[in-house]
């Protein structure tokens, strides 16, 4: 398959992998995290991935997001096969089609909330004037309209994570990958951030893949999958509350 060739994946699939595997070789020892994983998420769908610590959930998310390279199998993002793309092309595809939310917000401390949310649009090539309006709109949407000029150190934990959610969604990506996005929040704030993510998913149509240890919150997703023993299996299927 030539570079940039689009693979004929299902038309409603925004992210998927086939035969995905990851093995680490350290000090002569080989550790197989998983092998032969198949996964697919459709437009607008929400999926939670649960599992014990060390099961490989974050590794899987990094592979799906093109932040790490698999040792076997392939990942497709909006029909493009990641392994055929160069580093710059993968970066552009990630910026255009994917959003990322982490347990630690990873906001840039020297920039304001507004500047942090504008950043993905600026990286994509938009002018500051063109990036300003959509960033303001999303910050208003997540309840930070009065905190635009505040830097991360001046925001509460919940406010920082809501800012991170806005940053992940500002490009209106096909899919958001969230790794324990509420792990550092209290129960009430965690529920509010999860609710916001689901609400924006329904409003914008962005798919969500959420790694979490909290099964009560995971049940708010359309599907819940468990990663255990190197395999991914369905646990339950429910509609968001």
Image: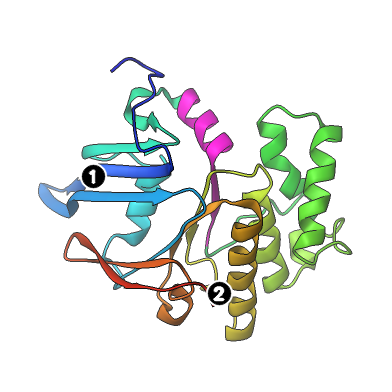
Mark 2 falls on what kind of element? Answer: loop
Residue 49 locus on image (x, y percent): 36, 65
Mark 1 falls on what kind of element? Answer: strand
CA neighbours of label 1 inside 10 A, class few (<14), some (14 to 19), many (20+) = many
Question: Looking at the image, which residue is at 58% across and 35% down?
Answer: 96
The stretch in magenta equals 88-102
Q: Which mark is residue 184?
A: 2
| 109 with respect to 229 (left or right) | right
Where does the N terminus fall, quadrant-wise? top left
Of 219 and 121, nearer the camera is 219
Whether residue 241 appears in this view of the structure is yes
| 165 with respect to 110 (left or right) | left
Q: Which mark is residue 20?
A: 1
Task: Give the mark count.
Answer: 2
Of 194 and 147, nearer the camera is 194
Q: Where 97 sits versus 101, above or below? A: above
Of 118 and 226, nearer the camera is 226
**Residues tagged 1 and 2 counted as in contact (Cβ below 8 A):** no
Question: Looking at the image, which residue is at 81% across and 52% down?
Answer: 137
| 63 with respect to 204 (left or right) | left
Question: Any magenta on residue 92?
Answer: yes
Please tell me whether the stretch drawn in magenta is mainly helix, strand or loop.
helix
| 182 with respect to 113 (left or right) | left
Query: What separation in Å lies between label 1 and label 2 (alpha carbons)?
Result: 30 Å
Question: Looking at the image, which residue is at 12% across and 50% down?
Answer: 30
């Amino acid at each position: 398959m030539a570079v940039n060739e689009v693979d004929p994946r299902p038309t409603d699939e925004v992210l998927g992998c086939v035969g995905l595997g990851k093995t680490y070789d350290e000090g002569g020892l080989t550790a197989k995290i998983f092998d032969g994983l198949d996964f697919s998420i459709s437009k607008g769908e929400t999926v939670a991935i649960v599992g014990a610590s060390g099961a490989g959930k974050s590794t899987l998310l990094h592979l799906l997001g093109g932040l790490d390279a698999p040792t076997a199998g392939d990942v497709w993002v909006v029909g493009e096969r990641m392994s055929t793309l160069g580093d710059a092309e993968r970066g552009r595809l990630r910026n255009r089609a994917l959003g990322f939310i982490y347990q630690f917000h990873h906001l840039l401390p020297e920039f304001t909330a507004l500047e942090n949310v504008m950043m993905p649009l600026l990286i994509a090539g938009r002018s500051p004037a063109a990036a300003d309006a959509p960033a303001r709109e999303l910050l208003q949407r997540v309840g930070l309209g009065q905190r635009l000029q505040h830097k991360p150190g001046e925001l509460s934990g919940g406010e920082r994570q809501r800012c991170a959610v806005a940053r992940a969604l500002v490009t209106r990506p096909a899919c958001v990958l969230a790794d324990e996005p509420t792990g550092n929040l209290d129960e009430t704030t965690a529920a509010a951030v999860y609710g916001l993510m689901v609400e924006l998913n329904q409003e914008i149509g962005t798919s969500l893949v959420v790694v979490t240890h909290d099964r009560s919150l995971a049940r708010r997703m359309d599907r819940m999958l468990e990663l255990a023993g190197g395999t991914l299996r369905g646990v339950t299927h429910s509609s968001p509350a």
